[in-house]
Image: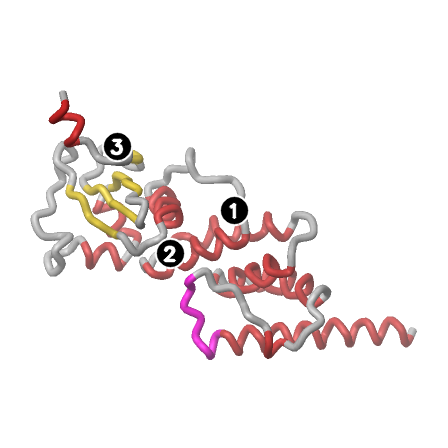
Amino acid sequence: METEDAAQPATPTIEIARNGNVILVIGPQQKRIRVCSMVLSNASRYFQAMFGPHFSEGQGLTFNPADPKEIEMPEDDADALELVCCIIHVRNDVVPNVLAPQKLLEFLATADKFECLIAMRFIGRIWLSQQLDGQHRPLKDYAAQIIAAYVLDHPSSFTKATWRFIKHWDGSLTDLQLPTAGFDISDNLYWHIIYAITAERTRFYTKFVDILAL
């Protein structure tokens, strides 16, 4: 009995795909999730390459669920990657109905890294719309929503988040530190977002002046 207990993994395995042939061991907490390599490969070019013959993760890979291959991913966000895998495997029974702004950014950053952002766009827009339909939030949440809307290519949400942001931000936009949650925000993207926020603020003030002039 002692030998059997010692052979057991430190953390239980989350069965996203019960017949999956791969167990991803993610993050410093070593979260274990069972997935199907073929399902992930169909949705993600990153996984398609990783499970291919040119990388160690794909070498010796079989489709035998009785002998799943363990793949260590210590630097990745365990919760975000688990959520990405749940959506790819159509595990809607465990996908949350709502997601906080910062968690949404972390989710999108992970989806972008694993090259499956398009597959996450529909649910991402739903989560973002729910956030924007809610009550007043801290300023940092509106900033996160602006980034998320831009990444999700959702103009109406971008406009709504920007309007809410500019009504509460009274500083210089050049001093603004946008939350990225690890998302690779290039200088061009950053300044494009700043320009868009500036345009929205100018339009807001123009409308306000027009109303006062009536």
From the viewer's side, name the closer residue of 170 and 149: 170
Q: Secondary structure at mark 1?
A: loop
Which segment did they paint magenta? 182-189
Q: Position of residue 130 (x, y in %)?
A: 59, 48
Asked if residue 169 is positioned above or below residue 141 in the image, the reply reads below
Q: Position of residue 161 (x, y in %)?
A: 63, 61
Q: Dividing the picture into quarters, in which one does residue 170 lie? A: bottom right
Badge nearest the viewer, 3 or 1: 1
Asked if residue 100 is positioned above or below residue 182 in the image, the reply reads above
Return the mark for residue 18: 3
Quadrant of the snapshot with the N terminus:
top left
Q: CA distance from mark 3 to mark 1?
A: 25 Å
User: Which label's residue is closer to the chain start, 3 or 1?
Assistant: 3
**Residue that protrudes farthest toward the front in the picture:** 2
Q: Residue at x 52, y 65 (%)?
A: 150
Q: Position of residue 40 (x, y in %)?
A: 27, 49
Q: Secondary structure at mark 2?
A: helix
Q: Are marks 1 and 2 in contact (CB under 8 Å)?
A: no
- Say which residue label 2 marks: 111
Quadrant of the snapshot with the C terminus:
bottom right
Q: Dividing the picture into quarters, in which one does residue 19 lie? A: top left
Kind of residue indicated by mark 2: Ala
Q: Please rate how many residues cluster around mark 1, counting C-alpha atoms within 10 Å: few if below 14, some from 14 to 19, many from 20.
A: some
User: Which label's residue is closer to the chain start, 3 or 2?
Assistant: 3
The image's colouring method is: secondary structure
Q: Tell me: 161 left or right of 20.
A: right
Q: CA distance from mark 3 to mark 2?
A: 22 Å
Residue 115 belongs to the span the image colors magenta: no
Return the mark for residue 99: 1
Q: Dividing the picture into quarters, in which one does residue 2 lie? A: top left
Q: Please rate how many residues cluster around mark 3, counting C-alpha atoms within 10 Å: few if below 14, some from 14 to 19, many from 20.
A: few
